[in-house]
Amino acid sequence: MNARRCPSCRTYVEESDLRCFACRGDLSKGGPVAPLRRPQLLRTVRKDKTASSALLVVLAVFGFIGVSTLVLNSGIALPARIGIAAILLLGVLAGVIPAGPGGSAAVSRPILKVFAFFGLLVVTGIGLIFALVLIIFVACATGAAGKW
Ligand SMILES: [Zn+2]
């Protein structure tokens, strides 16, 4: 599994590929690697702002829930929980309260992204837990099958 970069868009491609899956560029041509440029595929996704915003909101909700559970987790030291709660509160306040005329969107979107980042962590964590459970389940199932 030897990965290399597409000379046109710098996307990682398989050594055996003849054409870049992202920009359809010819991979056989050598030469210096082109400066970083977004592949057409990603640019098309970027254009769909409604979908990306919706995804951002969904992830932000996950992030909010995730951070909230941290605050409510009695296993974590109280000062740490207060700190997390303060960050959470600040984030919500900054995200909800409009920062003057026209300024609200510019402020709330980065905040949303911060929560979306937490959400991504939460979703990734849930995914990992599911994967772990699945592995344990499979390991137990195969272990039971091969019982002696
Ligand atoms: Zn490419």
Image (cartoon, rainbow, N blue to C red):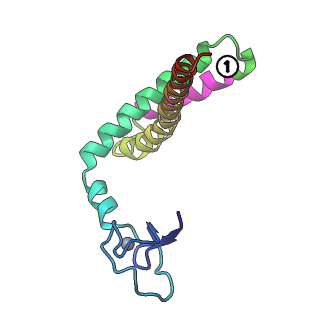
Q: Position of residue 3 (x, y in %)?
A: 51, 67
Q: Position of residue 12 (x, y in %)?
A: 47, 66
Q: Position of residue 8 (x, y in %)?
A: 40, 78
- Bounds of the magenta segment: 82-97
Viewer-proximal residue, 63 or 104? Answer: 63
Q: Residues within 10 Å of mark 1 (few under 14, many from 20)?
A: many
Name the side, left or right, on which 62 lies relative to 78.
Answer: left
Viewer-proximal residue, 27 or 40? Answer: 27
Name the side, left or right, on which 39 lies relative to 7.
Answer: left
In what element is the residue under mark 1?
A: helix
Viewer-proximal residue, 102 or 61? Answer: 61
Query: Magenta-highlighted stretch: main secondary structure?
Result: helix
Specify the quarter for ligand 1. Answer: bottom left
Q: In the rendered view of the protein, which quadrant contains the C terminus?
A: top right
Residue 97 seen from this side: no
Q: Position of residue 9 (x, y in %)?
A: 41, 73
Name the side, left or right, on which 63 lies relative to 74.
Answer: left
At x 51% / y 86%, what residue is drawn? 32
Q: Using the image, determine if residue 19 lies above or below residue 73.
A: below
Residue 94 lies in the magenta stretch:
yes
At x 36% / y 32%, what residue is drawn? 58
Residue 3 lies in the magenta stretch:
no
Say what amino acid the circle numbered 1 marks. Arg
Q: Can you name the residue that lies furthest to the top here?
A: 74
Q: Which residue is mark 1?
A: 81
At x 52% / y 63%, what residue is drawn? 1
